Image: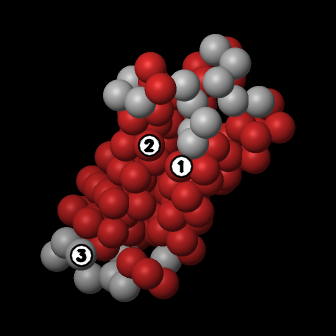
């Protein structure tokens, strides 16, 4: 069992989630239950799965939830790219978030590798 609050990957994933909420605040009302909602749910899924995995009994279970978190990261990237293509968000707002997501995916792969060795 890992203390998820101390994991840098979880902390960074929480930052991503906060930034996604702020970045999508001004999406049009017709996106309230569409892209805005999906983007936010994907963002929340990343730290949620990291923390759930950290609370599991084995490293194998933790790795499984890290894999789910990584899938949510790629889902979030797609939604961020689409938001940009639809002009719902500017490049200057979306690029830092994309870079954060890419960093978390790299951290995720490294953490998964370290759990395999343990």
Relative side of 43 to 24, left or right: left
Identify the disc placed on residue 98.
none
Residue matched to label 1? 21
Q: Is 70 drawn above or below residue 84 in the view shown?
A: below
Colour mapping used in the image:
secondary structure
**Residue 74 appears anywhere in the view:** no
* Residue at the farthest left position: 57
Relative side of 49 to 36, left or right: left
Q: Earlier in the sequence, mark 3 or mark 2?
A: 2
Q: How many marks?
A: 3
Q: Secondary structure at mark 3?
A: loop
Q: Secondary structure at mark 1?
A: helix
Q: Is 109 drawn above or below residue 14 in the view shown?
A: above
Q: Residues within 10 Å of mark 1 (few under 14, many from 20)?
A: some
Q: Position of residue 13 (x, y in %)?
A: 52, 60
Q: CA distance from mark 3 to mark 2?
A: 23 Å
Name the front one of labels 3 and 1. Answer: 1
* Residue at the farthest top position: 86
Q: Residue at x 39, y 78 (%)?
A: 4
Q: Secondary structure at mark 2?
A: helix
Quadrant into which the N terminus falls: bottom left
Q: Is 21 drawn above or below residue 3 in the view shown?
A: above
Residue matched to label 2? 40
Residue situated in front as seen by the camera: 18 or 3: 18
Q: CA distance from mark 1 to mark 2?
A: 6 Å
Q: Earlier in the sequence, mark 3 or mark 1?
A: 1
Q: Position of residue 51 (x, y in %)?
A: 33, 69
Relative side of 56 to 32, left or right: left
Report which quarter residue 91 is drawn in: top right
Identify the disc placed on residue 55.
3
Circles 1 and 2 in contact, beta carbons < 8 Å: yes
């Amino acid at each position: 069992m890992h203390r998820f609050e101390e994991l840098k990957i979880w902390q960074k994933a929480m930052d991503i989630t906060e930034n996604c909420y702020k970045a999508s605040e001004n999406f049009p009302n017709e996106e309230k239950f569409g892209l805005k909602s999906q983007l936010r749910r994907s963002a929340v899924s990343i730290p949620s799965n990291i923390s759930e995995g950290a609370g599991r009994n084995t490293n194998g279970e933790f790795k499984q939830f890290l894999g789910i978190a990584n899938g949510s990261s790629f889902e979030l990237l797609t939604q961020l790219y689409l938001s940009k293509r639809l002009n719902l968000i500017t490049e200057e707002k979306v690029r830092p978030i994309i870079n954060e997501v890419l960093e978390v995916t790299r951290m995720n792969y490294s953490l998964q590798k370290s759990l395999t060795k343990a």
